[in-house]
Amino acid sequence: MMIFFDIDDTLLDNQKAERAAAIEFHRLHQDVFPVSPQGFAVLWRDATEKHVRRYLLGELSFQGQRRERLKEIFAEHRTLSDAEADTLFETYLDFYEKNWTLFPDVESCLDQLVGTRLGIISNGQAYQQRQKLIKVGIIDRFSIVTISEELGISKPDRRIFLEACRAAKVSPSECWHIGNNINADAQGSLSAGLRGVWLNRNNMNCFQGIPTIKSLSELKEIIDSQNQSPHPITRMKGYG
C-alpha cells in the first residue's frame, strides 16, 4: 500500500501563508492601495487563483504567472515592467515563505502512518514545493515526491497519478491519495484508479459516494475500514 498526499491546504496551510504575506505586502504599499489589509488579501487571492490556473493550463510560465499577478494588482495605479514585477514579487515571496506552517493535525497523522510508504503528488513548481516540505521538516517522511512541473502534467489529469504509482512500483488500486480539492485531488485520483479521499477542512457540501474527512486525524480510521472492503468504483456527479 502507498498513501499519497497533496501539499497546499492539505499538509501546509497555504491560504494562511498567502493571506499573512499579502497583508504584510499591503503594509508596505498602503499608500498605493486604499483598501483594508483584509480587502487587499482578497484581491491578492483572486489574482493568484486566476493566474496560477493559467500556469497549470500551460498558458504562462511559473515566473510569468507571478508577474501577471503583480501587473493585474497594480494596473489601476501604474504599468509595471517585468523587472519591476519581479522585484515586487520577491518582497512578497519573503513574507510568504516566512509564514509556511503545517496544519496542527499533520504530524500526528504521519506518526500514525509510520511503517506505511508515503508519497506526494502536487501541482506547482518543483523547487518551491520541495522547499515547503523541507522548511516544515517533513520531506523525509515521503519516499516519492511527484510534482507537476517535472512531468508537464497537472492534477486532475490522471496521468500524474499513474506516474506517481509507477515510480512507487505499486498498482493504483493499492494506492491512496488525500487532498483538499474535490476536482484535482478526489476526481483525479479516482479516475486513475486510486482510492481518493477528500479532505474537506472547510466543511463544504459533501459529495455522495466520495470518502470524505474533515481532519487528517480521521485518515487512518477511514483507510483501515476501507482496506477491509473491495476497491470502490465511484461515479462523481457534476465533475464529468
Image (cartoon, rainbow, N blue to C red):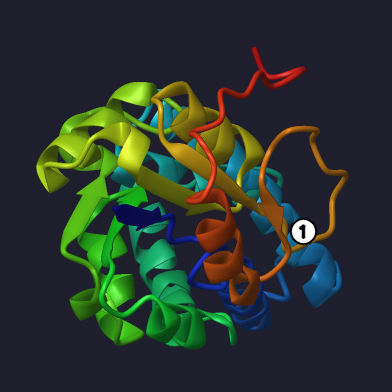
Q: Which residue is at 34% across, 45% downward?
A: 175
User: Where is residue 151 drawn, in percent x and y?
Assistant: 18, 33
Image: 157 above or below 47? above
Compare residues 163 and 21 and report the one nearer the observer. Answer: 163
Image: 74 above or below 239? below
In this image, 37 relative to 171: left or right?
Answer: right
Compare residues 116 and 94 and report the one nearer the observer. Answer: 116
In this image, 121 relative to 108: left or right?
Answer: left
Q: Amino acid at mark 1?
A: Val
User: Where is residue 4 drawn, in percent x and y?
Assistant: 36, 54
Compare residues 47 and 77 and report the one nearer the observer. Answer: 47
Give the residue furthest to the front.
228
- Residue located beneath label 1 in the image: 42
Q: Quadrant for residue 200, please give it.
A: bottom right
User: Where is residue 174 drawn, in percent x and y?
Assistant: 32, 42
User: Where is residue 65 drawn, in percent x and y?
Assistant: 42, 41
User: In the rendered image, is residue 23 in sight?
Assistant: yes
Compare residues 43 and 205 and report the one nearer the observer. Answer: 205
